[in-house]
Image (tube, rainbow, N blue to C red):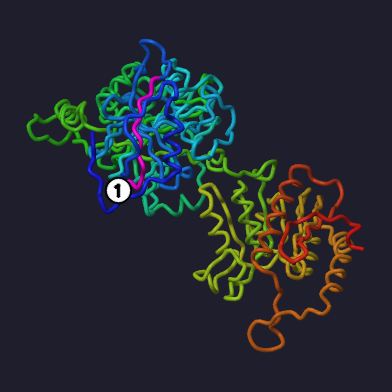
Amino acid sequence: MRVRREAEEAQELSEELRAARRAIIGLNGVELLRDWEWYGKERQWVLQLRLEPDVKPDGPVPPSTDWFVRVRPAYPLGSIKFNPAKLNGLTATFQHQSHNSEGPDSLPWRDGAICLNTPARSLGRRVFDIEPYDADKRLRWYVARANRWLEAASRDELVLPGEPFELPEYPVDLSTPLTVAFSESRESFVVWEETPQQVGIVDFYLLRRGVDVQVVKSFRTFEGNNLPAQPWGPSVTRGASTIAHGLWLRLRSTPFLKPWQAPVDWGELRAVCREQGADLDELLRVAHEKIKDKDKIGQVTLIGFPIPSVFGGSPEMMHWLGLYMPKLVNDKAQARGFRSGKKWSWQHNRDRLMRDDISLRWLDSENWHPEQLQTRGRSRGELTSKKVLMLGAGALGSTVAELLVRGGTHDITVVDDDRLEAGNLVRHTLVLEHLNEHKAESVAKRLNGISPFAHAQFINAKFPPEHPAIVRHVKDCDVIVDCSGSDELLFDLSSFGFGGDRLFFSLSVSFGARRGYCFAARGESFPHNTFRQMVEPWLRKDLEENAENELPREGIGCWHSVFPARADDIWAMASMMAKYIERVSAAPPTEAELVVFEREADESGAFSGVRELSGEDVR
């Protein structure tokens, strides 16, 4: 199949692409069918190959298949894609492969690009090693791996026991801009294992965004039992525009057609359910009959099934797929061409709206449990389960609080009576729209927007609080972090009775944020005298070093001096402080301690890192 390319898009074949082509000529099991061709609309160079690896006889992979290799003009840089040809290409979908649909009519290749940079042991890799980037080596490396991929696929060895479990790619219906979010874990899986029902009602929070998100609020059985709760924070519970409802349906295992293909129409989904001993039509029919107020049920149905963490492992978590359903006719209405009554309305739904050849409309479905969302960077230790009281919502406090929440600390209360001024914007986490608003309240709202599980609260007042309810709330906190830079507040903190051991931190920075001071102590109250004894030598040192420096002024007059420190220096110190809080929370000190971080510079004065100082360095 040849496709007409736009003449005006023609590009000159680079020497790097010529070298790549020469390098694969003569490889065993590789035949060059067509030289590099430029596909202007895709902005890719495309090479057609025939691969004839040593596959298992009579296996699922033909002994000879054709492939289109797609690279960017920047080769040897950029991605390299191997797609099956529509003629004499691979038609099945395997593990480590995109859903292998026909794709656009205008292109000669299918959509099912195979994943060749996977760390699968079957392809000879246990970790991500460094692939060659020389022009004459990189394509050759990929071609060799493509042959090994086909050999492993033919022997059902693309994934081996113990490798991370992956789902088939369920092709999302792009015409329905909707994402479904849920929260499932090993703990909630125990509840599902004890639940005999296969169908029920699911309630959603509907969040209006660029792409709408339906977040699972709760699962219910038709008997009225509530199933695993979804502990969302106020960014979800208060940010929802409305509550929607749908159906949930459970299967025994991952729905797929062998070898690893997602069902794409109602007929394939019925076949998958039958293999698991489930009658999809009967489950949906019974569920539809049990719904009391059918007009309140939306068009999103969740199909759930247990999954393991590794291939060959035991199931340990529920996963849910969102399916956008057709608008079904309820049993009180009469469908055109059908008699009235429950039997015939359902027959209409089955034969007209969910016919075997009608495509499924899969939705983007995501597990938003903290263990899933924070795999890119989660704090370790005990801190994430603690209630944190943040005293001070200035540049340092707002940054430290944000780092803690991004690391998984969800229960945090911010205390500050100050309002945001324009001058704060140079280094604060808040922005113009928060001008003249209470810092504590605005920071708490920002923190809640960072994580769907964050429960950030605020107190727009000085410490210590006076209202009895607020006093009780403060006393309920486990970790107290002072970022106020106020000696008066620390004195008040030392006389505030928490009624039990607490972990205290006091964080501050020196002139220009050259140093960061991290004080930690454990006890029933903040040890103010000990703090002063430890930090005063450093403060004297800072004054001596900056005796000639005049404080910058903001506005007009002699009473408008401000503390100088750039945002990047504040953030650098805040990062070290957040790590320090995490470290100390995991192993609290038996005695009060002061740790000092100092910004380093090379001979030219350029930033070169941050080091931790000892008590000797103050002399």
Out of 335 and 472, give the one closest to the viewer. 335
Residue drawn at point x = 58 percent, y = 62 percent: 443
Residue drawn at point x = 72 percent, y = 55 percent: 577
Q: Quadrant of the N terminus?
A: top left
Q: Main secondary structure of the magenta part?
A: strand
Out of 288 and 46, give the one closest to the viewer. 46
The magenta stretch is 41-52
Q: Check disc 1 and report the residue beneath it.
A: 41
Residue density around tag 1, few if under 14, some if 14–19, many if 20 or more, within 10 Å? few
In the image, farthest residue toward the bottom: 557
Out of 71 and 37, give the one closest to the viewer. 37
Q: From this view, report whether residue 607 is shown above or below residue 546.
A: above
Name the side, left or right, on which 568 lies relative to 534: left
Out of 520 and 12, give the one closest to the viewer. 12
Residue 213 in percent (x, y) is at 39, 47
Q: Examine the image and state in which quarter residue 570 appears.
A: bottom right
